[in-house]
Image: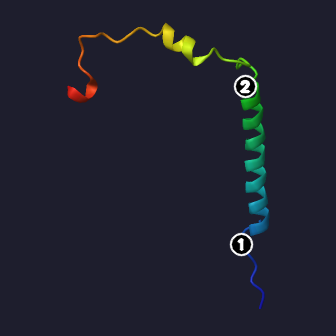
């Protein structure tokens, strides 16, 4: 006796469509990431320059662990 599935698609076809959708989504995500990475500067300023630009903490405030 042969059992015929009620739907027109088998498990293989549905699995293939899921994998195909994941690949298509990944391609669009990679393209978007590459486009955004083109706008990132090739070099950043050294960390010392960034630390000098930040204002110093007020001397009158106690450290956070003693509050």
Q: Nearer the viewer, residue 3 or 27?
A: 27
* Residue 31 visible from this viewpoint: yes
Count of numbered labels shown in the rendering: 2
Which residue sits furthest left? 67
Please state the horizontal and vertical placement of residue 17, each as a whole percent of the image.
77, 56
Q: Which residue position is annotated with label 2? A: 37
Quarter of the image that includes the N terminus: bottom right
Say which of 52 and 40 sits in front: 52
Mark 1 touching mark 2, by CB under 8 A? no
Q: Nearer the viewer, residue 12 or 52?
A: 52
Residue furthest to the bottom in view is 1
Q: Is residue 54 above or below residue 1?
A: above
Mark 1 vs mark 2, foreground winner is: 2
Q: Distance of mark 1 from mark 2, alpha carbons?
A: 48 Å
Residue 9 higher or lower than 58, as above or below: below
Name the residue rendered at 74%, 83% in the picture: 3
- Quarter of the view holding residue 57: top left
Tell me the residue at 38%/10% (across/down).
56
Q: Give the side of residue 55 with respect to residue 3, left or right.
A: left
Position of residue 30 measured from the top left corner of the image (x, y, whole percent):
75, 36
Q: Check the picture and name the quadrant holding the C terminus.
A: top left
Q: Is residue 10 visible?
A: no
Pointer 2: residues within 10 angstroms few (<14), some, or many (20+)?
few
Is label 2 in a helix, a strand or a loop?
Answer: helix
* Mark 1 residue element: loop
Residue at 63% in and 14% down? 45
**Residue that mark 1 sits on:** 6
């Amino acid at each position: 006796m042969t059992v015929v599935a009620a739907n027109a698609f088998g498990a293989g076809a549905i699995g293939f469509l899921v994998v195909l959708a994941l690949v298509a989504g990944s391609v669009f995500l990679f393209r978007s990431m590459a486009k955004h990475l083109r706008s990132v500067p090739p070099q950043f300023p050294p960390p010392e320059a960034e630390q000098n630009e930040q204002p110093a903490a007020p001397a009158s405030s106690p450290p956070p662990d003693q509050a």
